[in-house]
Amino acid sequence: MSKGVVVIGGGAAGMMAAIAAAERGATVTLLEPNERLGKKLNITGKGRCNVTNHCPPEEVLASTPRNGRFLYGAVTRTPPAWVEDFFTGLGVPLKVERGNRVFPVSDRAADVIDALFFRMKKLNIPVTQARASKICLEEGRGSGVETDCGLFPCRAAILATGGCSYPATGSTGDGYEIAQALGHTVVSPVPSLVPLEAEEDFCGKMQGLALKNVSLRVKNQKGKVVYQERGELLFTHFGLSGPLVLSASAHMRDFAREQYTCVIDLKPALEEQKLDARLVRELSEQANRDFQNVLGSLVPRLMVPTVIALTGIPGDRKAHDMTKGERRRLLEVLKGLVIHIRGPRPIAEAIITSGGVKVGEIDPKTMGSKKVPGLFFAGELIDVDAYTGGFNLQIAWAT
């Protein structure tokens, strides 16, 4: 059998795996069904490519709610600092932005893909446009990777086909079938880092409104808080999106059995007592104005009709006529805007897939299969996923 390694998948994990194997002296072939490499990489970070997060390895693991401990070896040996040095060394200058997100100075994902491609070219790694269907790593005839372009013999294969989010980029989930055919368990894929659909129609009425520096709590049906963080979110025609909501969705895996509720604190910097004192002051200073006009100094204009509806206070009620009970209702809405979640948007709209090849069947030191000698895994195909902010690409490079 050939001494070569076949890498299946030309995304972030696949390209890095091919480079790493070739740098260690292996003869490598990369298989990718798309006409070009890094198709999903090209749209990450809104086309700017958030390559990693400028943080210590411990923070990467803490930002990986799904099987973070499994990644300890990979992330400590290939931490964010290594990734930054790697791309800088390939001629891609980087910059650090809000939330320690690391981007190319050029703001072009294409520069990251080009750097990887030219490194592969320098290492003489051929790329073949082919879709893999089966792997056989036993000695003898027919051993290697079977594709729609024939058999590619090899002594080792690296599966890096991604999940099944953004299927238009080639993430169709076929890697799961290949892994299962080899005896691996695949944890059912579900969308993660995905917008959420709301029961309430007022979200659609506030479509396009972005709220910054708000606090979001997510409760399950027993009332337990499964996620809490401060940041930015967005109202959409179907419900909620934005960085805060995408990260929250990573903790909302069980929609089949759970009902989730989002509670938004619009004024997290103010405790209830201080906010109440501010409301008293606002209502007193604008005593002769209508309630709806006073609200304009407390919430964004697009939110005013929703707050009026939720409090039940008539918009034309004069500020000086508002009762203590009405002020209390306003306070409760500002500190706890409740939105019931119907479910996630389709997996095709998710940034990443949660689920995949069971981590207990993979050696965390090598990413090698515990079931099939010579088989390795990298990237989103593995059952690990993290928050937004460059953490998922960090996992792709490290694994």
Image: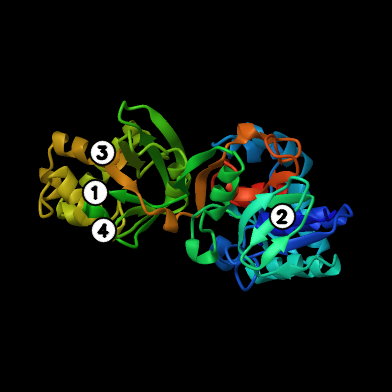
User: Disc 1 and disc 2: Cα gap in Å?
Assistant: 83 Å
Callout 2 secondary element: loop
Q: Which residue bears the numbered disc 4?
A: 204
Inspect the image, locate mark 1, and give the three-letter code of the amino acid beneath it: Glu
Whether residue 105 is visible, yes or no, is no
User: Disc 3 and disc 4: Cα gap in Å?
Assistant: 23 Å
Answer few, some or many: residues within 10 Å of disc 3's Cα (few below 14, many 20 plus, some between 14 and 19): some
Q: Which residue bears the numbered disc 3?
A: 331
**What number is the disc on residue 142?**
2
Give the mark toward the camera: 3 or 1. 3
Callout 4 secondary element: helix
Q: Are marks 3 and 4 in contact (CB under 8 Å)?
A: no
Of callouts 3 and 4, the N-terminal one: 4
Give the mark toward the camera: 1 or 2. 2
Of callouts 3 and 2, the N-terminal one: 2
Please state which of residues 237 and 265 is positioned toward the viewer in this rendering. 237
Give the mark toward the camera: 3 or 4. 4
User: Disc 3 and disc 1: Cα gap in Å?
Assistant: 18 Å
Please determine whether, in this image, residue 202 is positioned above or below residue 79.
below
Give the mark toward the camera: 4 or 1. 4
**What number is the disc on residue 299?**
none
User: Disc 3 and disc 2: Cα gap in Å?
Assistant: 70 Å
**What number is the disc on residue 285?**
1
Inspect the image, locate mark 3, and give the three-letter code of the amino acid beneath it: Leu
Q: How is the image coloured?
A: rainbow
Residue lying at 71% horizontally and 56% vertically, measured from the top left: 7
**Residue, far front:** 141
